[in-house]
Image: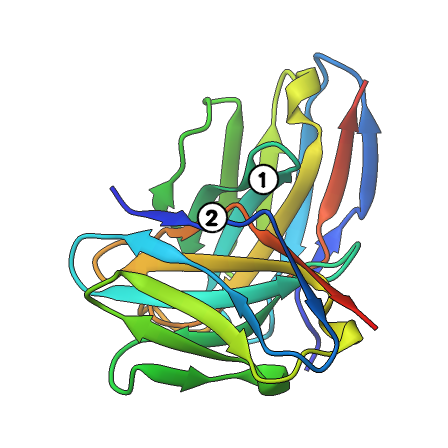
Amino acid sequence: AQSVAQPEDQVNVAEGNPLTVKCTYSVSGNPYLFWYVQYPNRGLQFLLKYITGDNLVKGSYGFEAEFNKSQTSFHLKKPSALVSDSALYFCAVRDTGGFKTIFGAGTRLFVKA
Amino acid sequence: KAGVTQTPRYLIKTRGQQVTLSCSPISGHRSVSWYQQTPGQGLQFLFEYFSETQRNKGNFPGRFSGRQFSNSRSEMNVSTLELGDSALYLCASSWQKSTDNEQFFGPGTRLTVL
């Protein structure tokens, strides 16, 4: 069965510093991996995805993620955090044979000015 | 292009009642998924539809059901509501039949069961 783990409930970072939000996954076959962000009282917004190819994926708002097959990880990164990046971030996995997306529990990012 | 719309945005019901939530996907999107979001359980997959066919279903009791119409609009129904059904219900649509497409989420319907 596929699963996603986000080991940190909250990540705190100072504005201007790099940020990392961690995600590990378990899926049979090749995974499709996604990151979404949720702002208060709103639905989720797509940030980026890994399907195949280059392990470093670039997405919206300056975010990027690195796919590591040996460690089954897909960590979200940004070189310089902004206060406006403060939100709830979800990692998700979808296996190539199924029609179901499994989301991690979410990580709340707090960027301090 | 208009985004995913969900109606109603807020709903208050009492235990034992039933409720129907509606979702209109982005024009041209044929896949619609439903999720339940709660503080304790996070985002839980309910079901996914493509061209009026349910392709997958999550681990929810039979009280939860859904359908998709020929115009891709979707509804989900919860019968015999329980207090634990209080949640934000999110609908998401995607473009193609393949499974590698990102999903576009609506703002959700917040259901409160008293």
Q: Residue B72: x and y, percent?
A: 52, 61
Callout 1: residue from which chain? Answer: B
Crowding around mark 1 (Cα neighbors within 10 Å: few <14, some 14 to 19, many 20+) is some
Q: Residue furthest left?
A: A29
Query: Who is closer to the viewer here, B96 or A41?
Result: A41
Q: Is residue B42 left or right of residue B83?
A: left
- Can you identify the residue that label 1 sits on? B76
Query: Who is closer to the viewer here, A29 or A58?
Result: A58
Q: Secondary structure at mark 1?
A: strand
Q: Quadrant of the N terminus of chain B?
A: bottom right
- Can you identify the residue that label 2 sits on? A7
**A69 versus B14 height, above or below:** below
**A72 versus B108 height, above or below:** below
Identify the amino acid type marked 2: Pro
- CB under 8 Å between callouts 1 and 2? no
Say if labels 1 and 2 share a chain: no
Q: Residue B67: x and y, percent?
A: 50, 44
Is residue A87 visible to the viewer in this orientation of the structure?
yes
